[in-house]
Structure formats: C-alpha cells, structure tokens
C-alpha cells in the first residue's frame, strides 16, 4: 500500500482499543501498490475521520485507489472517510474496494462495520471496474456509500461491479464510460434502491444532517460533524 492506516491486530487491538482518527492525506503522488490509501486489515481499534484530497494516483501496478479491509476475527469500526479531488491515470482493479472477509475469513465474533464513505470529484482514465464491496451475504455491515461528481473512463469490465452486504449506496452525477451511473448491477438476492440525487441532509462539505446526538469538530481547514445515526 502507498499509505496504510492501522490501529491494532486482533487481541492486541482489542486490548489497547485506540482508534486511528483525524487523519488528512493531501497532495500526494502514488504509484505501485495494493492500494493508494488502505485502511486495515489490522484495524481492530477502529478508524474515524479520514480525509484524502488533491492527490494523483497512476500506475498499471496500482490495484485500487481506496481500500478498506478487515474480517470477522479482526473486527473494527471504520467511519467517516472523505475522498475528493483525486486524479487517477489508471489502476489495475477498482476505484473503491471494501473487504469484510479479508483472507477468506467469513466467520467470527467480531463483525467489522464500515460506514459513511464519501467520494467526490474523482476522475479515472482506466480501471477494470468501479466498485468492489464484499460484505456479508446475510447482513449489511457496509453502509452509506456516496459518490458525487465522478467520471470513470476506460472501465473495462463494468458488468462485474460487485456489491454484497451493503446498504444505502448513492450516486450523484457519476458517469462510467460516458454513461450516467445511477443503478447497481449484482446482488445475491439483495435489492438496493439507488437514487440519482441524495437527500438534502447528505453533503460532501463534511457535514451530514441526522437525528440524534451530534458533535462538531474543527481540524485545519475542515469543519465536520459526527452524529450517532443517519436520518
């Protein structure tokens, strides 16, 4: 991985229980690797509030742009990942890859939860596909994925975009090979309602309006709010 974010592995991570949080990745050039920015798989302590912006990623040996991974023996809660203004020349596999059964581990007592992943203004000239979200067949532990103002060209296999065990995936002004991308392919018996435009409470200015408890925090040039649950 070009940049790898980790917060502890298995029992060590549960013992210390210290999440990675409030991380900014800005104005980087990334080449070869399994991912441009990877979170996990040693993410047992959790990861909250990551910004990736104004970066260039380009290599036939770069597998994915953003990758989040764990498994049910490792666990971890990853939330509030904001990615914007990314220029991709090419990558080998997907723009966004999420794996909750990493290393083919699909059973265990510590289910990972990944939620609130926002991608805005991502352009790519070549990839095999756009999304690979590999969660659990019988439950949704991947939640609230939002893509806005993105253009993906040279997608070689758009028919193998994969989404399993995810809910609330939204696209706003997203094109794949010049065509509007506002529906999902796939589903192993699961049904997704995909909206062309998100509701007004969902914004990529790092503010999400919801019901419930809220907290406001300021880091650098960003102001963001963290809430307990979506409206």
Image (spheres, grey):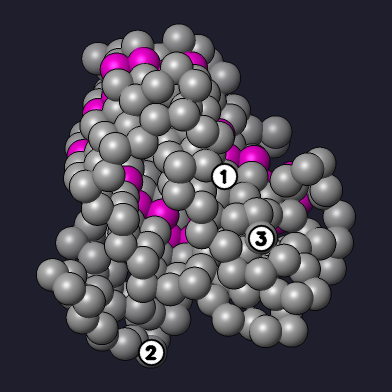
Q: In which image quadrant can residue 207 be found?
A: bottom left
* Residue density around tag 3, few if under 14, some if 14–19, many if 20 or more, within 10 Å: many
* Residue density around tag 1, few if under 14, some if 14–19, many if 20 or more, within 10 Å: many
- Any magenta on residue 138? yes
Q: In which image quadrant can residue 174 be found?
A: top left
* Figure check: 223 above or below 183: below
Image quarter where the C terminus lies is bottom left
Q: CA distance from mark 1 to mark 2?
A: 28 Å
User: At numbered mark 3, what does the secondary structure look like: helix, strand or loop?
Assistant: loop
Q: Residue at x 65, y 54 (%)?
A: 41
User: At numbered mark 1, what does the secondary structure look like: helix, strand or loop?
Assistant: strand
Q: CA distance from mark 3 to mark 2?
A: 29 Å
The residue range painted magenta reads: 115-143
Q: What residue would you read off at disc 1?
A: 98
Residue 155, given in percent of the width and then of the height, sits at 40, 15
* CB within 8 Å, label 1 to label 2: no
User: At numbered mark 2, what does the secondary structure look like: helix, strand or loop?
Assistant: loop
Single out the residue that lies furthest toward the left. 221
Q: Residue at x 36, y 73 (%)?
A: 22
Q: Which mark is residue 42?
A: 3
Q: What residue would you read off at disc 2?
A: 213
Residue 153, given in percent of the width and then of the height, sits at 30, 16
- Any magenta on residue 82? no
Camera-side residue of 43 and 229: 43
State which tag comes first along the sequence, 3 or 2.
Answer: 3
Q: Which numbered disc, 1 or 3, marks the residue closer to the eye?
A: 3
Q: Residue at x 27, y 44 (%)?
A: 28
Residue 88, given in percent of the width and then of the height, sits at 30, 28
């Amino acid at each position: 991985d070009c940049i790898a974010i980790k917060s502890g592995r298995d029992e060590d991570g549960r013992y210390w229980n210290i999440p990675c949080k409030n991380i900014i990745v800005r104005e980087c050039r990334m080449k070869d690797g399994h991912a441009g920015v990877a979170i996990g798989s040693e993410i047992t302590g959790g990861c909250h509030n990551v910004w990736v912006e104004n970066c260039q990623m380009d290599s036939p040996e770069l597998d994915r742009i953003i990758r989040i991974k764990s498994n049910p023996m490792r666990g971890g809660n990853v939330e509030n990942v904001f990615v914007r203004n990314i220029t991709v020349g090419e990558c080998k596999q997907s723009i966004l890859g999420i794996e909750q059964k990493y290393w083919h581990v699909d059973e265990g007592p510590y289910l990972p939860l990944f939620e609130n992943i926002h991608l805005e203004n991502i352009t790519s000239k070549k990839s095999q596909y756009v999304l690979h979200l590999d969660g659990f067949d019988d439950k949704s532990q991947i939640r609230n994925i939002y893509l806005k103002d993105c253009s993906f060209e040279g997608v070689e296999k758009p028919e193998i975009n994969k989404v399993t065990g995810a809910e609330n995936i939204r696209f706003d002004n997203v094109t794949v090979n010049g065509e509007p991308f506002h529906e999902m392919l796939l589903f192993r018996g699961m049904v997704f309602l995909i909206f062309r435009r998100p509701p007004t409470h969902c914004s990529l200015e790092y503010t999400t309006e919801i019901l419930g408890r809220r907290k406001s925090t300021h880091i650098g040039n960003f102001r963001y709010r963290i809430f307990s649950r979506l409206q």
